[in-house]
Amino acid sequence: MISRRLLNLKERAIRAFFFLNGILVVVILAGIFVLLLSSAVPAFREIDLKEFLFGALWDPTSPIRASYGILTQIYSTFLVTLGAMILAVPVGLAVAAYLSDVAPGRVREIIKPVVEILAGVPSVVIGFLGIVVLGPALSKLTGESHGLNALNGSILLAIMSLPTIISISEDSLAAVPRSYSEGSLALGGSRWQTLLRVKFPAALSGIIAAVMLGMGRAIGETMTVLMATGNARSFPHGLFDSVRTMTSNVAIELGEVPYFTTHYYALFAIGLVLFLLTFLINLAADRVLHKYRERER
């Protein structure tokens, strides 16, 4: 009787612990949003919201007329992130499928730790790779004077996103019940057909989570894109142009701007826009996943 009561108390304590942790996450997220919002609101007393979101010129220190348009930065951020995802998602899913279904045990024991080690490489080291190795290579390949451009940033962000995409996707594929694969193979399906038509759909929720976390890693990265993309304020017309993302702009200017000025508050407004864009992307992915699950039922 006493042992049963102790067991019930332990279960209640564990439930309370997890519940409090969930509440803590919500509180932290809400706190970040409130901080950004309260610091961004003063900027819009001086800056027109339409000009801020759709203006292409960012020149807050102009002696003639300060400009606070962030459209160029938004476009640059999505250009670099989209390029990174185009490179990282196919490679990441291919490696995850190889580790899950094809790789021999010894090979998997080698590749898996290498992927995990890659996740721990500091972003500044990846940035050095872009400056010293990848930049000159792109310069020779394209004939440009330098290789610090959006493509350089996309390749580096793809490398940084790969560990997240590979690890979570591989775990999701490994979690699919073996009976699914055995049933497909028994019905005459090949290993390739089983992987694409059975295991990938069954693990889709985990794969989408992997891609979204990888995208979050790319869209919020600062140091690597700061070092490898050239940081030009002009509107980019392709991957071979230098770009300045939202995170890079905040990192470059926040340390030098006078406190409690319009310029200072505008940088917090950029952070708020980035926060909301990331939230909307994750919300859209969750809706797509929810519709897919309903259709499967």
Image (cartoon, helix red, strand yellow):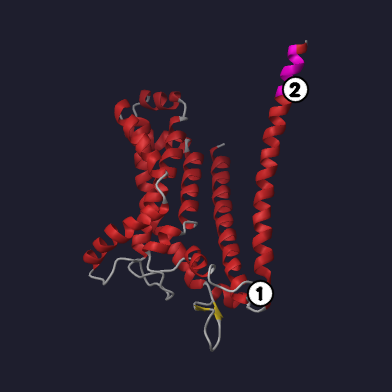
Q: What segment carries the magenta color?
A: 3-10
Mark pair 1, 2: CA separation:
52 Å
Determine whether label 1 and label 2 are within 8 Å by CB.
Answer: no
Task: Please tell me which residue lies in front, 98 or 217.
Answer: 217
What residue did someone put label 1 on? 44
Local packing at callout 1 (Cα closer than 10 Å; few below 14, some 14-19, many 20+) is some
Measuring 46% from the left and 42% from the top, which residue is drawn there? Answer: 207
- Front-lying residue, 191 or 76: 76
Q: Position of residue 181 (x, y in %)?
A: 40, 27
Callout 2 secondary element: helix
Query: In the rendered image, is residue 190 in sight?
Result: no
Q: Which residue is mark 2?
A: 9
The amino acid marked with disc number 2 is: Leu
Quadrant of residue 154 in the image? bottom left
Q: Is residue 283 left or right of residue 76?
A: right
Question: Which of 196/10 is in front?
Answer: 10
